[in-house]
Image: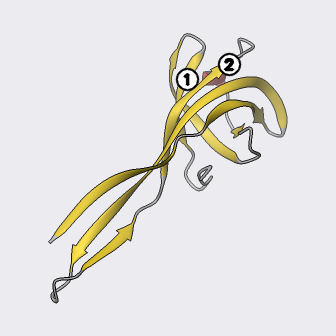
Amino acid sequence: MQSDQSRILEKPYGVGTVTQNGVTISQVSYDLEVTQTYRTFRTHSGSNIEEPGVPSVSGTITSKDEVDLSKKENLILHLADGRTMGFLVESRFDRSWRFLVKKGSGTPA
């Protein structure tokens, strides 16, 4: 028997910067949610084994200076606490963007 459960690891928010190829292109505010799926297996002896999946990040990034991030590549979000995360723009809402974390770029967690 197996079941999956998603858990929120953290919800970072704040003010940071976005860089492209090492150059700061925008001051932004961000509101993120870091989640992780856990798969629970029941062993033949009846005990449960929990196996964590890869964390995922979603949220919004809002430009404070009118930069259109949707037309940019190689973007890195620099969080206020010093962590960084590569991302791709998924969709745009006025000056805010939903985004996808680039595979292999890690999570801010």
Where does label 2 land, which residue?
63
Residue at (62, 52) in percent of width and height: 105
Q: 21 left or right of 59?
A: right
Mark nearer the N terminus (2 vs 1): 2
Disc 1 on helix, strand or loop?
A: strand
Expressed as whole percent of the image width and height from the top left, the position of residue 79 reads: 71, 39
Give the crowd class for mark 2: few <14, some 14-19, many >=20 residues within 10 Å: many
Tell me the distance, in whole angstroms, between the alpha carbons under discs 2 and 1.
9 Å
Q: In this view, does 26 lie to the left or right of 3?
A: right
- Residue occupying image coordinates x 38% and y 52%: 7
Is disc 2 in contact with disc 1, using a CB cutoff of under 8 Å?
A: yes
Residue that appears at 26% across and 59% down: 4
Q: In which quarter of the image is residue 28?
A: top right
SS assignment at label 2? strand
Identified by mark 1, the residue type is Trp
Between residue 24 and residue 41, name the one nearer to us.
Answer: 41
